[in-house]
Image (tube, rainbow, N blue to C red):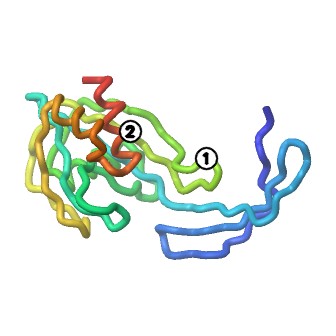
Amino acid sequence: MENWKTIAREKVLERGKFLTVEDHTVELPDGRTIPQWPWVITPDFVNVLAVTEDGQFLCFRQTKYAVEGITLATVGGYIEPGEDPLLAAKRELLEEMGYESRDWVSLGKYIVDGNRGAGSAHLYLARNARFSGKAESDDLEELELIYLNREEIADALVSGEFKLLSWSLTVSLSLNHV
């Protein structure tokens, strides 16, 4: 199987470091070309599910601009330019929850949209997490840190309480490792 080829690209929108939209001219393996193929560039990000030494899963109860109502969430954020994804995951866990871990499991890197780009998600499980100090989150949303046992987090996952795909995937993959 051959890959599609980018023949040309033109920037059509730029909104700082969080969003760029390009039109690509794409050549298909059979030689046909498609003009104005929209391509979305956003920063890569991390999501982390942390579980404490006594088996409590750390989640947030919060709101998000694009989510209707209240949702459960894992910790996460954008990867800074040049930053290693695991270091970004450790930074986010400490900044947002005040926890640290020395026992990390990579759950994989996933493309957000296979046809339009939109960055990559780097997912992690932080086992044996320990509280190390006050969280200093710069998030715009109000966050309530909650602790769930294995049964509670599994029930929350199945009932749709994690309303973002990346959070649901992080929880689902993590439950295979604990």
Q: Position of residue 47 (x, y in %)?
A: 34, 46
Q: 10 Å neighbourhood of mark 2: few (<14), some, or many (≥20)?
A: some
Which numbered disc flags the more N-terminal residue, 1 or 2?
A: 1
Q: Quadrant of the N terminus?
A: top right
The answer to which image quadrant residue 37 occupies is bottom right
Left or right of 148: which side holds 89?
right
Q: Position of residue 145 (x, y in %)?
A: 13, 51
Q: Nearer the viewer, residue 169 or 117?
A: 169
Q: Which mark is residue 114?
A: 1
Residue name at image x 54 percent, y 56 percent: 118
Q: Which mark is residue 168?
A: none
Q: Position of residue 102 (x, y in %)?
A: 22, 33
Q: Nearer the viewer, residue 128 or 158?
A: 158
Residue name at image x 23 percent, y 66 percent: 141
Residue name at image x 35 percent, y 42 percent: 168
Query: Which amino acid, mark 1?
Result: Gly
Query: Which amino acid, mark 2?
Result: Leu
Q: Quadrant of the C terminus?
A: top left
Residue name at image x 50 percent, y 41 percent: 110
Give me the C-alpha separation between circle 1 and circle 2: 16 Å
Q: 10 Å neighbourhood of mark 1: few (<14), some, or many (≥20)?
A: few
Quick one: SS at disc 2?
A: helix
Quick one: SS at disc 1?
A: loop
